[in-house]
Image (spheres, rainbow, N blue to C red):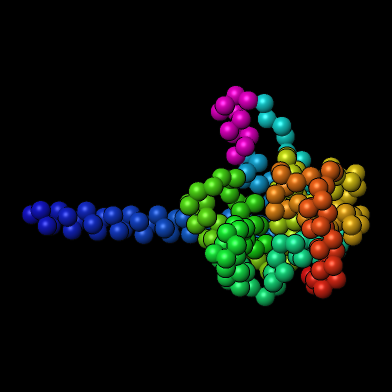
């Protein structure tokens, strides 16, 4: 009798897990399919931060966010971001295992920790997930990365990334950043401006576009040298 009960419970758990998995796959797949065709009105993190401020009853500063079509973003910025963030963007399927090997080697030999996130991974994270550090978020990021690589082309992934990436405190996307830092639209950015904006992306809250440190200027110069070799989608 006990064995029979255990078997029933076990079967029920497996069926429940299977059903929940199907619901989750359908829900996340639908999210990705929607934004294949529609431009997102904002990001999950924007909603998340607003909700947290209401719960904590703290003042919430509205995010600056304005969608800019791919054609209306400076080609200089596109090349600068590719040079800075993901030079193998067009050749990998969302996960750059070559870069991951380099990162692991650096961690072992130089005890230096840095990320290996691709543009696809960052697009998934920026659009669909709140800003938090947890194992669940990394798993969700990987899952969304697989989905957007399956359903979106590289141009759409890059367009979503450029419009939703965190570019500083309360600045979401290229248009908001260009207006805040250089008082111009995203399609008017010069080569130097684009390289400086790309240079801060690894730590947009730590580094300043308006007051660049010597290290940031070095990054900018390195990006400027690499930009001509970057493709234009």
Q: Quadrant of the N terminus?
A: bottom left
Q: Is residue 203 left or right of residue 148?
A: right
Residue 119 can be seen, yes or no:
yes
Residue shown at the point (56%, 45%) measured from the top left: 132
Say above or below: 171 vs 223. above
Which of the two residues, 207 or 191, is positioned nearer the viewer here? 207
Residue 183: percent from the left, percent from the top? Answer: 90, 44
Q: In which quadrant of the rendered view does residue 227 lie?
A: bottom right
The answer to if 91 sits in the magenta stretch is no
List x then y, in percent, for residue 120: 64, 63
Q: Residue furthest left?
A: 1
Q: Who's the residue at 58% across and 49% down the image?
A: 129
- Picture coordinates of residue 226, whole percent (x, y): 81, 68
Where does residue 114 sit, x and y in percent of width and height? 62, 58
Horizontal side, residue 195 vs residue 170: left or right = right
How many discs appear?
Answer: 0
Q: What is the quadrant of residue 77 in the picture?
A: bottom right
Instruction: From the viewer's side, name the closer residue of 81 and 128.
Output: 81
Q: Is residue 202 left or right of residue 75?
A: left
Please state if 185 lies on the left or on the right of 88 as rendered: right
Vertical placement of 213 versus 37: above or below? above
- Residue 51 counted in the magenta span: yes
Looking at the image, which residue is at 89% across and 46% down?
182
Q: Nearer the viewer, residue 126 or 104?
A: 104
Q: Which image quarter holds the C terminus?
A: bottom right
The residue sitting at 81% across, 47% down in the picture is 213
Q: Residue furthest top?
A: 57
The secondary structure making up most of the magenta span is helix
User: Residues in magenta?
Assistant: 48-58
The answer to whether residue 68 is visible is no
């Amino acid at each position: 009798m006990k064995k029979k009960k255990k078997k029933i419970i076990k079967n029920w758990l497996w069926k429940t897990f299977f059903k929940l998995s199907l619901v989750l796959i359908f829900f996340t797949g639908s999210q990705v399919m929607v934004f294949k065709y529609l431009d997102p009105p904002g990001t999950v993190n924007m909603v998340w931060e607003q909700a947290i401020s209401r719960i904590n009853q703290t003042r919430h500063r509205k995010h600056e966010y304005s969608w800019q079509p791919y054609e209306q973003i400076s080609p200089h910025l596109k090349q600068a971001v590719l040079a800075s963030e993901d030079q193998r963007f067009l050749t990998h399927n969302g996960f750059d295992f070559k870069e991951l090997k380099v990162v692991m080697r650096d961690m072992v030999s130089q005890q230096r920790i840095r990320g290996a996130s691709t543009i696809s991974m960052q697009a998934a994270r920026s659009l669909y997930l709140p800003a938090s550090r947890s194992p669940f978020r990394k798993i969700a990021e990987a899952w969304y990365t697989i989905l957007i690589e399956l359903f979106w082309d590289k141009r759409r992934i890059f367009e979503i990334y450029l419009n939703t990436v965190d570019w500083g405190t309360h600045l979401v996307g290229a248009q908001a950043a260009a207006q805040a830092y250089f008082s111009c639209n995203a399609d008017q950015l010069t080569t130097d401006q684009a390289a400086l904006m790309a240079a801060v992306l690894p730590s947009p809250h730590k580094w300043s576009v308006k007051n660049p440190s010597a290290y940031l200027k070095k990054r900018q110069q390195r990006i400027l040298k690499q930009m001509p070799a970057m493709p234009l989608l």
